[in-house]
Image: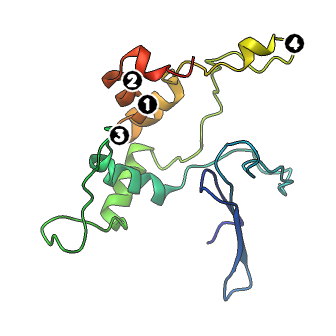
Amino acid sequence: MFPNSLKNAHLHTKFSAVIPYTDGSRTKFLALDKCLPKRRFLQILDIEHKASEPLELKYDHEWLTVLFLTNHLLSVKSTYNYLPGPNNSNERYTFTPTPDELALIANKFDSNFTVPSNFICTAPPYNPNQPSSNRNKQAHSKVHPNTTTFCEQLCIDDPLALLLAQSTPSSLNNHD
């Protein structure tokens, strides 16, 4: 079974493709650029949906497993970081999940990969009536409780929490 569509963001360029399969089905892939001025980082799409089915997002089981398997490679230090490669035969450098690793992650999620519909607002929304001098300031970084819950369930580190733990407030908010 192949997905009808895949979406990705922050790929540093816009890229789209249609992947045909021998059974006649296809997957539409769309990646969007970084969120910067004059970049194509946003696109509005009409996505077909059967009214008889629930409207929900799902985590990708294989990608969750790759995140779990590569958590030890995460670094928030501003230095060069070591990544394993084929020249070091004692260390894993490909992270295509095995059936046992996929089963481990399925167990962590009780085989339910539905993204919870429990958004929590942690910053004020855009207000066009707010004076522009206040609107142009860099928002303060905050760890989001939904991300914390997700990382805890998957047993991985939250990169922002790690970054905030090693940084002083002045170094994080030097845009003010």
Badge 1 is on which residue?
A: 160
Q: Kindly report the distance in space between the C-alpha atoms of the residues bearing marks 3 and 2.
A: 16 Å
Helix, strand or loop status at disc 2: helix
Question: Can you identify the residue that label 2 sits on?
Answer: 164
Q: Which mark, residue 156?
A: 3
3 sits to left or right of 55: left
State the residue at coordinates (34%, 64%).
95
Above or below for 109 versus 98: above
Nearest to viewer (mark 3 / mark 1): 1
Q: Helix, strand, or loop for circle 4?
A: loop
Would you say the residues marked 3 and 1 are in contact, meaning their CB atoms lie under 8 Å apart?
A: no
Q: CA distance from mark 3 to mark 1?
A: 12 Å
Q: Of the residues under marks 4 and 1, which one precedes in the sequence? A: 4
Q: Quadrant of residue 49?
A: bottom right
For label 3, the SS is: loop
The amino acid type of the residue labelled 4 equals Asn
Helix, strand or loop under label 1: helix
Q: What's the amino acid at mark 3?
A: Ile
Q: Position of residue 86 (x, y in %)?
A: 23, 74
Would you say 25 lies left or right of 161 here? Answer: right
Q: CA distance from mark 1 to mark 2?
A: 6 Å
Amino acid type for the residue under numbered disc 1: Leu
| Label 3 Cα crowd, 10 Å radius (few <14 / some 14-19 / many 20+) | some
In which quadrant will I find the C terminus?
Answer: top right
Q: Pointer 2: residues within 10 angstroms few (<14), some, or many (20+)?
A: some
Mark nearer the N terminus (4 vs 2)? 4
Figure quadrant of the N terminus: bottom right
